[in-house]
Image: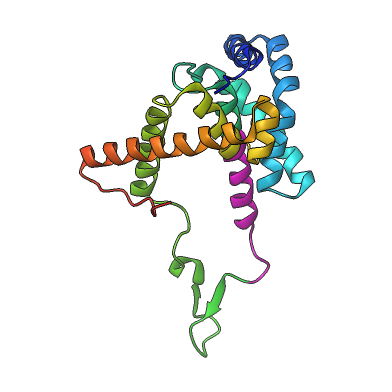
């Protein structure tokens, strides 16, 4: 089975170096990082928020976030492109939530009866769509577990899964990008997902919380 090209590893190492220098306030490194990754980031954003104008604004937010939080990137825990595309994906999702939260043009008040002065605020009785503290805690815990389990995969599996599920590429596009046979990439993704499921099941079992993965 052929291995990923040395060029792929070199590119990943270069992005890691650029992120490290960006964290130190190096604007030249930040500009280089933008040139090398913004097209992929924009593709991720545009797949989620299909309004091109909004997607361009989100892309700016993505790189403002990267500039501010580059120091939080840990090369031992994640690949640089995986981390960057995760930032892009989260910002794109946030943009959809903001759009959904835009105020409606109808009145938020309605009359309780015949008395026009007796009104109630209907927003007070509507359930919040925002995640509660427990859900946020669960999400953070699951994200940490997923990060740990990603580290048990081979570099080939991590790279293929990241490109397919974070960047939204098809298996064919991943194969073309990595210059590998399509069957090889499909095998990396399939085996990587199986290993991830086993790892997450094991972690959930240790925590005493069985995990339902739907059997996929």
Figure quadrant of residue 30: top right
Give the color scheme: rainbow, by chain, secondary structure or one colour: rainbow
Towards the viewer: 34 or 118: 34
Q: Residue at x 26, y 48 (%)?
A: 210
Left or right of 90: which side holds 128?
Answer: left
Where residue 61 appears, as percent x and y from the top left, is 67, 33
**171 horizontally vs 43: left or right:** left
Q: Position of residue 96 (x, y in %)?
A: 63, 50
Q: Find the residue positioned furthest to the bottom.
A: 114
> Residue visible at 46% across and 23% down?
154
Instruction: State which quadrant residue 200 falls in.
Output: top left
Horizontal side of residue 139 vs 205, given as left or right = right
Q: Main secondary structure of the magenta part?
A: helix
- Residue 216 appears at what percent x and percent y? 43, 51
Quadrant of the rendering where the N terminus is positioned: top right
**Magenta-colored stretch includes residue 183:** no
The region drawn magenta spans 87-106
Q: Residue at x 55, y 73 (%)?
A: 109
Q: Using the rendered image of the protein, determine whether residue 43 is visible from the camera's viewpoint.
A: yes
In this view of the protein, which residue sits in the foreground, 89 or 169?
A: 169
Verify whether residue 91 appears in magenta.
Answer: yes
Q: Residue at x 65, y 65 (%)?
A: 104
State left or right for residue 176 relative to residue 207: right
The residue positioned farthest toward the front in the image shown? 1
């Amino acid at each position: 089975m052929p291995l990923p090209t040395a060029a792929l590893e070199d590119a990943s190492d270069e992005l890691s170096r650029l992120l490290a220098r960006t964290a130190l306030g190096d604007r030249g490194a930040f500009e280089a990082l933008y040139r090398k990754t913004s097209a992929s980031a924009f593709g991720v954003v545009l797949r989620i928020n299909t309004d091109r104008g909004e997607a361009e604004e989100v892309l700016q937010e993505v790189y403002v976030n990267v500039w501010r939080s580059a120091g939080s990137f840990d090369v031992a825990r994640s690949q640089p492109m995986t981390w960057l595309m995760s930032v892009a994906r989260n910002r794109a999702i946030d943009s959809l939530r903001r759009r959904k939260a835009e105020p409606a043009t109808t009145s938020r008040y309605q009359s309780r009866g015949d008395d026009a002065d007796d009104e109630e605020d209907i927003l007070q009785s509507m359930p919040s769509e925002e995640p509660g503290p427990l859900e946020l805690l669960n999400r953070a815990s699951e994200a940490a577990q997923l990060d740990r389990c990603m580290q048990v995969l081979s570099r080939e599996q991590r790279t293929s899964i990241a490109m397919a599920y974070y960047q939204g590429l098809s298996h064919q596009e991943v194969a073309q990008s990595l210059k590998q046979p399509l069957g090889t990439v499909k095998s990396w993704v399939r085996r990587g997902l199986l290993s991830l499921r086993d790892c997450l099941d094991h972690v959930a079992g240790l925590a005493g919380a069985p995990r339902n993965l739907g059997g996929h």
